[in-house]
Amino acid sequence: MSDELRIVVDGRTIPARRGQTILEAADLAGVYIPHLCHLRGLLPHGSCRICVVSLDGRTVSSCTQPVQDGMLVASDTPELNEHRRLLLELLFAEGNHFCMSCERSGNCELQALGYRFGIGASRFPLRCAPHRIDASHPDVLLDRNRCVRCARCVRTSAAVDGRHALELVGRGIAREIEPGHGARLADTALVAADRAPDACPVGALLRKGEGFAVPIGRRRFDHRPIGSEIEERSEVHP
Amino acid sequence: MRMEDPSSAAIRSICTSVDRDPGRLLDVLRAVQAQCGCVDNQAVATIADCLEIPEGRVRSLVGFYAFLSERPLGEVVIRLADDVPDWMAGRDRVEAAFVEELGIRPGATTPDGRIGLAHTSCIGMSDQGPAALVGDVVVTELSTDRAREVVAGLRSHGQPARLVRKLGDGNNAHPLVRAMVRNNIRQAGPLVLTEPRRGEAMRHALAMSPAEVIRAVKTARLRGRGGAGFPTGMKWEYARQAPGAAKFVICNADEGEPGTFGDRVLLTELPDRVFAGMTIAAYAVGARRGILYLRAEYAYLAPFLEHILEARRRDGLLGHSILGREGFDFDLRIQLGAGAYVCGEETALIESCEGLPGTPRNRPPFPAQRGYLGHPTVVNNVETLACVTRILEAGPAMFCAQGNPSSSGTIVLSVSGDCELPGVYELPFGTSVREVLERAHGREVAAVQVGGPSGRMVPARDFDRRLGYEDLPTGGAFVALGADRDPVEVAARFTAFFAEESCGHCTPCRVGTGMLRDGLERLRAGRAGAADLDMLNQLAATMRATSRCGLGQTAARPFLTSLEAFPDAYATLLRSDPDGLRAGFDLERAVATATGIRDGGTHVR
């Protein structure tokens, strides 16, 4: 059984390897499937559901679905994009995302997805629930108001930094990022050299002492929508 | 039982009793909660140290399971069931009596720390509600007077067991059970609720090859009784074919779908039939170990079930060389849950068995490929396993003689709500809703919630529809709703249940269930227009399509199916937006929320 496979995403045949997920194969081939909780190098989490695709009449998350030879996948369809838009609106309504004052603005993946999907405002009532801020750590700030529960920091701290400095605790809407040890971020083994803070797609984990380092106009998403870097990888532009 | 400071020596000894196996973390936490009244930060640190795991992992369980708590909830906690049948039976009046008598709101503890009051989801007593768990003791058929007696009793002697005066029928009166629970078996047989024939099914199974056993289950066309209806034989075949030396059989006794209680009766009266089913499954797939995952609400049955397991070991029906068959070894342990509906989802249940929060897994891989501790695992529901035993006892043909081609056999229905004869009815698949209501003496029934909140609200015009996988699938719940019940209120209550029980992993369920609940509340309060209803429909479609597990995928069904059944009930609630403002905006609440935001716990010096 060969490990070199082919799958079809939105009518385009792309190469894939056994053991890859649909999202990984698409990403490498320059087909952008929007995603948020996925971060290359980490085990998939399957939580944000932005990367949902249609497969044999079912809707599955492409970040967790392994490829099979000849698989027919639909991603960029009006129906799926409507689901994605609604999921993004739920995330905006869940947290307190005040882009105007957020240091991550322009580099924020949630904000960038919002722009890509043309979201002006969430159609859902904002929850406006107060979330705790933890400023105890000398190098890193945790602002739960902006968290999207993607666990990218949790997974990075465990798998890359080897520290378990952060954990998702609680059930349902009460699920929050908590220190992996003690009661405050300062009680954990987290150090400035860790990669976990950089894994945050939004402004929930910020490094102290370097606010607004990149001027407007040179930020990550100032000129190109999120996903462009993947689409440019494609040999054949659609 | 006085509460003491969590003694680290006691906690260490609990950890040692499970050989410091992190996989048994849930057992450790249950024991610490029972002994110390809570699992506080100091206890978390001690447990993490003793099991050599990160503190965050311990804390993630304490935050997940409803029966674990960071703070002491009281020496005895009264958990009053808050499901729809209990509400219909008057649980709100009972709650008011508890609140008045104790002087505290639900979620609080009396100032002397002795009694806590809490809400809980369905505890599997919908046929004899309003019901509550007082400690581990089940108290049924509560009235306001009885609630006052319960409080008086706890104040004077503090022993929940002494609240039980009259024992229930059958094994409810067994010395190891001693519960006031009644079986309420209204229709027994012809298949599942029949006289036990101990050992017979297993002797028949061992006379066959494992492949032949699987063929027999396939020939009987047995499908999972938990509600999803996956063909059992096929599930077994996948697990049998999956590579791996160690394989597991798990019985899902986390019966949590509100309005369901049939498994309670099977575990009380026919536990041997269930354990035989597990042993036959083990023989068929090549498993040597198993787990019965018992929901925390049924903890009162645990000592009795342990006693049945001991008897089976003694009689050679469990353990080494079962029934003298060299090389056929199988044994099982009971894993108690800790209050989480989502653990009924099979991959969440496996996580819980491994000592993790009950968060469903990404699939694939499926449990039959990689389940408990990464090994091929079969997860079957209690009733499914009882059916297995009957198929091997009486043969597939006898089983198939009941029901129809797509739904063979019978279903053990849990009937509750507006009817004279609530209880357990074993009926062949294909029975109509109307026939069930006639048997149960329904009282002016306008609709039936078939299959619980994740099932469907069936209006009277559809009472000729039939129970079965091809028409109205059900895990057993059958709640009769009288003409005076408001379908929108019922839907709102079911939706609130899903919001309460969402594990919080994926966006559509974590955020969507709460948005839907709030949307229905606005609608009921007359603060929603047609545009809001459209929005809820779109939300429901996204939740169904994109949620990661069955909970989120079905959480909008109370709304969707009640809207389909009673469109007029919704239409009369809609308001137009005469002043140009969205009817859905609640100015007062927004202001209250905004003024409530404070700088608590920021740790900014």
Image (cartoon, coloured by chain):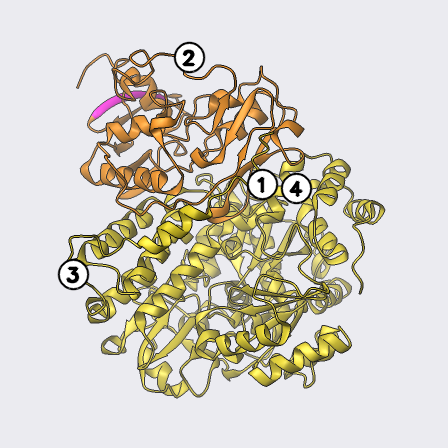
Chain colours: A orange, B yellow
Which residue appears at 78% of the width and 45% of the height? B15
Mark 3–mark 1 Cα distance, whole angstroms, equals 57 Å
**Residue type, mark 2 in image:** Ala
Q: Is residue A73 visible?
A: yes
Q: Residues within 10 Å of mark 4 (few under 14, many from 20)?
A: many
Magenta-span inclusion, residue B583: no
**Residue type, mark 3 in image:** Ser
**Residue type, mark 1 in image:** His
What label sits on residue B58 in the rendered view? 4
Mark 2–mark 4 Cα distance, whole angstroms, equals 38 Å
Q: Is residue B407 left or right of residue B143?
A: left
Mark 2–mark 1 Cα distance, whole angstroms, equals 49 Å
What label sits on residue B576 in the rendered view? 3
**What quarter of the picture does the C terminus of chain B occupy?**
top right
**Which is nearer the eye, B350 or B163?**
B163
The secondary structure that dominates the magenta segment is strand
x, y percent for residue B78: 63, 69
For marks 3 and 1 on the same chain, the one whose residue lies earlier in the sequence: 1
**Is B275 located above or below residue B358 in the figure?**
below
Marks 3 and 4 on same chain: yes
Mark 3–mark 4 Cα distance, whole angstroms, equals 50 Å
**Residue type, mark 4 in image:** Val
Marks 2 and 4 on same chain: no
| Callout 3: SS | loop
Reading the image, the residue beneath label 1 is B375
What label sits on residue A213 in the rendered view? 2
Which residue appears at 34% of the width and 61% of the height? B521
Q: Quadrant of residue B467?
A: bottom left
